Amino acid sequence: MNIVVCVKHIPDPNLPPEMDGTRLKREGVQGVLDPGDEFGVEAGLQLKEQHGGEVTLVSMGPPAAREAITRGLSMGADKGILVSDDALQNADALVTARVLAAAIKRAEFDLVIAGVESTDGYTGTMPATLAEFLDVPMITFVKELENAEGNLKVDRQTADGYHVVEAPLPALITVTAGVNEPRYASFKGIMAAKKKPVDELSLADLGLSGDDVASKQTVKELSPAEERKAGEVVEDDGTAAEKIADFLAEAKVI
Amino acid sequence: MAKIWVFAEVTPEGKADTTALEILTKARSLGGELEAVALGPGATQAAKELGEYGATTVHASDDDVYSDYVAQPAAQALYQLCREHSPELILFAQQYDSRDIAGRLSAKTGSTLMTNVMDIPDTNTAKTAIFGGTTIVDVALEGEPKLVMIRPKSFAPEASGGEASVVPVEVSISDELKKAKRVERHEEAASGPKLDEAPVVVSGGRGLQEPGNFELLEQLAGAIGNAAVGATRAVVDSGWVPYALQIGQTGITVKPSVYIAFGISGATQHLVGMKGAKKIVAINKDEDAPIFQIADLGVVGDALKVLPALIEEVKKRKG
Ligand SMILES: Cc1cc2nc3c(=O)[nH]c(=O)nc-3n(C[C@H](O)[C@H](O)[C@H](O)COP(=O)(O)OP(=O)(O)OC[C@H]3O[C@@H](n4cnc5c(N)ncnc54)[C@H](O)[C@@H]3O)c2cc1C
Ligand SMILES: Nc1ncnc2c1ncn2[C@@H]1O[C@H](COP(=O)(O)O)[C@@H](O)[C@H]1O
């Protein structure tokens, strides 16, 4: 199976976000492979172990996004594609999908895997838009992969349970955090990653122009959200249950 | 006059999803012609309810193809309808099926899709929250049509008492679009009130130590009555409770009268799903837990001690 995994490089979510005007600062800040995408990489690696083939990582981002690819390569993926171009600084989900589709279409693929939503952008729509550009069926919110060879069969999370969904390949899936336990990169893996090929592509390499990637989202204004204020905080001295019950009674719910 | 569409999810029993009613309620205030699109079994029947909340026309099809196959047929039908009727703005709810359909439609129409929207002050502006809801961004809406996805529970639904005329949707769906097929549905209707409708939510996080302790939350919910149990993603990912209980950015949004958090740290991704509660009570053994910054009543203590005591206390008071 030829498996493509979308990997996003994001500013380290454990550090406070830095702004560059009205945008999230992405260059010159500590970055990581989106933790949500580790599940995608793991899913790809497991499928390769079962069915053979290759795992290709694809990312769009600044040159530093190569770190995210390297990380996935050290987990065991075979090669990477990084699309990087100054014209992409403002890319929205639509533009990202257009660019990733062009990069993915350069080779034959059976399955594209992405995260349900990114940790920094959390639009959760890039994969659906990508599936449309690739003209393949898509199943989002996959919590279990039952079968992938020939025909895809997965459990898709829903609001009250799950659906079993089938689709022929090629297809696209997004995986939830419940789907697997991502492996750690071994020392050997980290050393091997240095020798694995990473294709760096510009928009021109993909046959796309600046017009194709002009973002249509303009920020008018940024403002802090209204914050709730902290109320009373008490140590539990054995009477906490009574205090809470008083509170519930006052709120007229008991 | 601006034509505004609301994409409504419907049940086979002919009920409109609450999100559609929420969005219609808000959309009424935007002026313009308000219409709904409903696809799949139950759509025609749901038109009545959609009308009561402000849709003057409902483009409806009861065809199974829209529920049997994921996203592709519905996106195609919407695209065809857009070409025929040129709506200026299409509003979706940010949830499973709508999200997939809107994402696909964005590629078809070439219009950008605004997500995580919490308000639309006018047809040219969307308010969305970033950084886990700590920063509000006003974004200019663009595109033909403009595509906007709204977080559930952003508006309170209020009927206006209107009536909608039904216009049957007749789009032919080619076999090429019948690919991702639902072959089994496993859905358990929860006992007690629905989590997103319950006036009281008692919720647990990793601080509850082990899955068995969720039973205590059930007991507390039972003692309070009209309460539902929720959870953080950390415990859902650990398999303690089903995903349907997850509250937050990637789960559901709740706005109960009282939210009680046991052993929950208060990560922004969790807070975004519950900070609309009228009152928040938090029990955490760490006095620096971020949840205390938004709690009306905070108890620094052991959730496993407070829970059984609270169950008894509530039972005692309710007699
Ligand atoms: C893209 C993305 C989306 C996410 N979406 C969601 C989402 O939708 N919903 C969500 O909830 N999370 C979400 N998260 C995860 C979120 O960041 C947190 O990891 C999660 O909410 C933490 O859950 P928790 O509070 O149960 O666990 P922890 O953060 O581990 O907190 C446990 C708390 O329990 C306290 N504690 C321990 N023992 C006791 C005791 N005996 N008594 C009382 N207190 C005790 C500890 O002091 C601690 O504060 C998301 C993360 C990402 C990256
Ligand atoms: N710039 C990107 N490069 C590679 N993959 C991406 C990029 N942006 C989004 N994705 C993928 O799409 C998923 C959903 O992202 P989003 O739509 O931003 O919430 C992520 O988990 C990634 O797998």
Image (cartoon, helix red, strand yellow):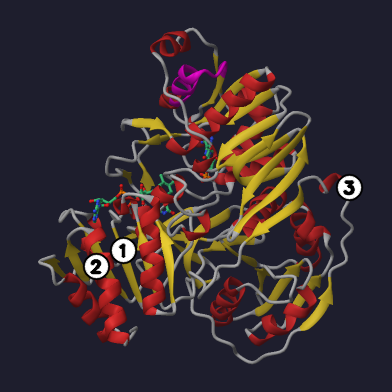
Q: Kindly report the distance in space between the C-alpha atoms of the residues bearing marks 2 and 3.
A: 53 Å
Residue identifier under label 1:
B261
Which quadrant holds residue A159? bottom right
Looking at this view, name the residue that lies furthest to the bottom.
B161
Name the residue at 30% across, 61% down. Answer: B262
As shown in the figure, which amino acid type bears the numbered disc 1?
Ala
Give the structural element (helix, strand or loop) at label 2: loop
Residue numbers of the magenta segment: A68-79
Q: Are marks 1 and 3 on the same chain?
A: yes
Q: Secondary structure at mark 3?
A: helix
Image coordinates of residue A235 in percent, x first then y, are 11, 64
Point out the tag, 2 or 1, that comes first from the N-terminus: 1
Q: Nearer the viewer, mark 1 or mark 3?
A: 1
Badge nearest the viewer, 2 or 3: 2
Q: Is residue A233 left or right of residue B189?
A: left
The chain to which mark 1 is attached is B
Q: Position of residue A152 (x, y in %)?
A: 73, 36
Per the image, the residue denoted by label 3 is B175
Callout 2: few (<14), some (14-19), or many (20+) C-alpha neighbours within 10 Å?
Answer: many
Residue A71 vertical placement versus B253 (above, below)? above
Q: Is residue B294 visible?
A: no
Distance from mark 1 CB to nearest ligand 1 atom below 8 Å:
no
Disc 1/disc 3 C-alpha distance (Å): 49 Å
- Residue A66 in view: yes
Residue corresponding to mark 2: B295
Please say whether residue A78 is one of the residues in the magenta stretch: yes
Q: CA distance from mark 2 to mark 1?
A: 9 Å
- Secondary structure character of the magenta stretch overall: helix
